[in-house]
Amino acid sequence: MIFQTDSEFEPDIQHFGCYFLSLLWQLNRLLGVPDLDHKVIEVIYNHEKEDKDMASEAFIQNPQGLVDFIAPGKVHFVGKQDKSYQCAPGEFAVQCWYNPATDFHHFVAEGSDGGVGYDPIQGGSRTVREGAIDSKRVYLLI
């Protein structure tokens, strides 16, 4: 399993790559792309920074552009949804959690049961243990 804190990653991914890695985990789980390998992930990250789909600190500023690069024509970014949003058939989500005690946000991949399917922090993040879902980023398989 790959985690954002793995030493093979550059600092931006290690500290801020939770949304990016959660989205890649979902695309791999559902479509088999990309191969979840540190080098492949770094290539995607660097390409997406160059074409401005990602900004510094691994901020995904164009989710549709990112998924179009990884899985062209297979995924549509639906948008940011409320924490109570239930995915329809063919949709998947990346959950955004918030911990008021630390004032941190953290993204995880939603599992098929609506719970956390993958947390990019090995052993699970404090934000998920002590916080609550704040919102979801929803995608549709097409």
Image (cartoon, rainbow, N blue to C red):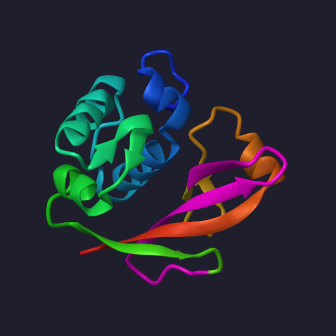
Residue pictured at 31% horizontal, 45% vertical: 54
Pinpoint residue 125: horizontal percent, then vertical percent: 71, 40
> Front-most of 42 and 91?
42
In the picture, measured across the screen, residue 40 lies left or right of residue 120, that is left
| Range of magenta residues | 85-108
Q: Is residue 43 magenta?
A: no
User: x and y percent of residue 29 in the render?
Assistant: 40, 53
Q: Is residue 79 left or right of residue 32?
A: right
Residue 82: give x, y in percent of width and height.
59, 78
Identified at 51% across, 22% down, the residue is 6
Residue in view at x 20 percent, y 56 percent? 71
Q: Is residue 37 above or below residue 87?
A: above
Circle count: 0
Left or right: 54 as drawn, with respect to 131? left
Residue 138: name its quadrant: bottom left
Q: Nearer the viewer, residue 26 or 14?
A: 14
Q: Tell me what residue is drawn at x 34 percent, y 42 percent.
A: 55
Q: Nearer the viewer, residue 57 or 30?
A: 57
In the rendered view, tell whether residue 90 sits above or below residue 127: below
Looking at the image, the residue that sits furthest to the top is 7
Quadrant into which the C terminus falls: bottom left
Q: Is residue 89 magenta?
A: yes
The spot of residue 23 in percent (x, y) is 41, 52
